Image (cartoon, rainbow, N blue to C red):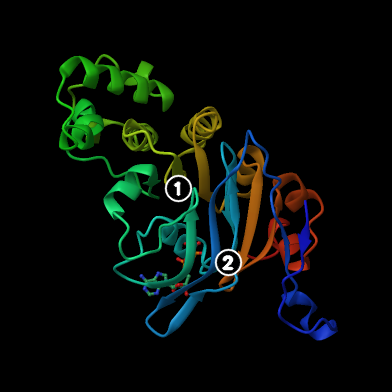
Amino acid sequence: MFINPTSQHQHNDNTAWLDRNIVAPEATSESPVVLETKNMHVFYGENEALYEGDLQFLEHKITALIGPSGSGKSTYLRSLNRMNDNVAKVTGQIMYRGVDVNQPDIDVYEMWRRIGMVFQRPNPFAKSIYDNIVFALRRRGITDKHQLDEIVETSLKQAAIWDEVKDKLNQSALALSGGQQQRLCIARAIAIKPDILLLDEPASALDPVSTSQLENTLLQLKKQYTIIIVTHNMQQAARISDYTAFFNLGRVLEYDETSTIFTSPKVQLTNNYVAGDFG
Ligand SMILES: Nc1ncnc2c1ncn2[C@@H]1O[C@H](COP(=O)(O)OP(=O)(O)OP(=O)(O)O)[C@@H](O)[C@H]1O
């Protein structure tokens, strides 16, 4: 583990609040780095919404992105799999298993299969539960009913919603509760067997019971997937994540193991934020 105090600013009392503390996660052969950003900057027109945001993500770990509103968490997350292509200019490298996916010749659709995304509001298609799961599979040419049935069952089980929906797979997904819809969206995302799951405040529209079910689902899923989640919920970040990045004003100020961020952060602003002093 190394500490990389990458502040480009003079260290004196006036700029102490700008200090950064980025601790790279300890990669091992069981948990290598699967995704990494290098020198990434994101611009909306003239506005540079993200700079100094470089992070590494380990396989089969959950990383939480936290920070006040407008600090650049969603901008960073959505840039990771080029969801921002139409609205922002993203420079720098986004290394996914050794390949820079921020290159013009990358097959973005194939990348979305490997780096899936679940959004803030559940967004199931206005189709049956079954068809929500198989939609992308059919488009990929998988038409064998037995194979599709199997994938539907496995994905719904992995997303911890199978027991609730197994007797009504042909009913509309829109008739499910918000929490169920969000778990269905996770099932839909994992049906195409991604490698990494990006989640942008997936529990913000859910009640506490659904939130807790979703968190349990994510803890199960990390055995197979690498998860990066934006959350405003400090307890949630503390409960489920292995690593946490604290964003402020378009930069990552601190990145470390979640236990360190919540018990002994090195940066004053992180401390203030996790203590609830501002947000
Ligand atoms: N599509 C967009 N077009 C222009 N500016 C944008 C766009 N999306 C975000 N921004 C700007 O980029 C900055 C970072 O926003 P972003 O949504 O990434 O922050 P955030 O930390 O995810 O905030 P929140 O927690 O409120 O979702 C803000 O100043 C925001 O106004």
> Looking at the image, is mark 1 or mark 2 earlier in the sequence?
2
Name the element at disc 1: strand
From the viewer's perspective, is residue 209 above or below residue 113? above
- 87 on left or right of 174: right
Q: Position of residue 39 (x, y in %)?
A: 55, 70
The residue under label 2 is: 53
- Residue 114 showing in the rendered view: yes
Q: Position of residue 200 (x, y in %)?
A: 45, 51
From the viewer's perspective, is residue 271 above or below residue 194? below
The amino acid marked with disc number 1 is Leu
Nearer to us in this view, 73 or 23:
23
- Residue 160 showing in the rendered view: no
- 46 on left or right of 265: left
Name the element at disc 2: loop
Q: Position of residue 15 (x, y in %)?
A: 77, 82
Residue drawn at (35%, 24%) of the image = 156
Nearer to us in this view, 107 or 139:
107
Ligand 1 is within 8 Å of the C-beta of the residue at disc 1: no
Point out the residue furthest to the right here: 13
Residue drawn at (30%, 62%) of the image = 105
* Disc 1 to disc 2, C-alpha distance: 16 Å
Instruction: Name which quarter of the figure residue 153 lies in.
Output: top left
Nearer to us in this view, 5 or 13:
5
Locate ligand 1 by image quadrant. Answer: bottom left
Q: Position of residue 40 (x, y in %)?
A: 51, 69
Q: Quadrant of the C terminus?
A: bottom right
The residue under label 1 is: 198
Nearer to us in this view, 35 or 87:
35
- 92 on left or right of 27: left
Q: Residues within 10 Å of mark 2 (few under 14, many from 20)?
A: many
Q: Residues within 10 Å of mark 1 (few under 14, many from 20)?
A: many
The amino acid marked with disc number 2 is Gly
